[in-house]
Image (spheres, rainbow, N blue to C red):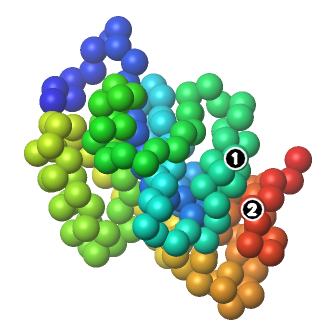
Amino acid sequence: MNMAKDENKERIALFPGSFDPFTIGHQSLVKRGLELADRIIIAVGINEKKQSYFPAEERMKSIQFLYADNPYVEVRSYQTLTTDLAQETHADFILRGIRSVIDFEYEKTIADINRTLTGIETIFLLTEPQYAHISSSAVRELLFFGKEVSSFLPDGMRIEEKRITINN
C-alpha cells in the first residue's frame, strides 16, 4: 500500500477495538489520529464469544455522543474481521495505540496478519505518558471492586451501576 498522500483523496483511518469502556487513552488516540487522517472510523468490535462488561449498543451510543459534533469521526459496530471492515469502509490504514512492549508484540503480530491478508498497513501511536497506565480492562477491574473510575473516562462520561451515562 502506498502511504503517500494523494491530495484529492480523503484519508480514512480505522480505529478498531472493544472500547469496553472507551477511555481517555482512546480519546487521545482519536485526537492524535486526526492529525494523520481526514476521518477516523471508530469501530466497536462485537464478539459474541466474548463476555463484554457493557452492552455493545451502550458502548456505541456513548462514543457517538462524545463525537456528535465532530464530522470527522464516525462510530460503527462490526462483527467481521477487521480487514474486511477496512476494505468495506475504504480505510487507508488501521490505527492502534501502544502502551508498552507487551502491547507492541501483540499488535505487531496482528498488523503482520492484516498486511498479509489485504495489504493494509497499521499505524501505531505511542500512548501519551500520562495515559500509559490506562486500559479498559483495568477500568473494568476497578469497577468490579466498586472503585471510582471517572478520572479514566472522557469528560461527560460516567459509569453508574454497570451503565455508561453521559452528562449533558
- Looking at the image, residue 127 sits to the left or right of residue 119; the answer is right
| Nearer-N-terminus badge (1/2) | 1
Could you say which quadrant of the image residue 19 lies in?
A: bottom right
Q: Which residue is mark 1?
A: 61
Q: Residue placed at 70% from the left, 70% from the top?
A: 151
The x and y percentages for residue 39 are: 48, 29
Vertical order, 149 against 73 (above or below): below
**Pointers 1 and 2 in contact (C-beta within 8 Å):** yes
Query: Which amino acid lies under the numbered mark 1 shown in the image of this protein?
Result: Lys
In the picture, the quarter occupied by the N terminus is top left
- In what element is the residue under mark 2? strand
Q: Residue placed at 28% from the left, 42% from the top?
A: 83
> In the displayed image of the protein, which residue is found farthest to the left?
116
> In the displayed image of the protein, which residue is found farthest to the right?
168
The x and y percentages for residue 26 are: 53, 56
Q: Using the image as rendered, state which of residue 155 and residue 81 is in the foreground.
A: 81
The x and y percentages for residue 31 are: 53, 43
- Looking at the image, residue 91 sits to the left or right of residue 63; the answer is left
Q: Residue placed at 20% from the left, 47% from the top?
A: 114
Q: Residue placed at 80% from the left, 75% from the top?
A: 161
- Looking at the image, residue 154 sits to the left or right of residue 56; the answer is right
Query: Which amino acid lies under the numbered mark 2 shown in the image of this protein?
Result: Ile
What numbered label is drawn on residue 164? 2
Q: Using the image as rendered, state which of residue 12 and residue 52 is in the foreground.
A: 52
**Residue 130 visible here:** no
Spatial separation of the CA atoms under disc 1 and disc 2 = 9 Å
> In the displayed image of the protein, which residue is found farthest to the bottom?
145
The x and y percentages for residue 149 are: 71, 75
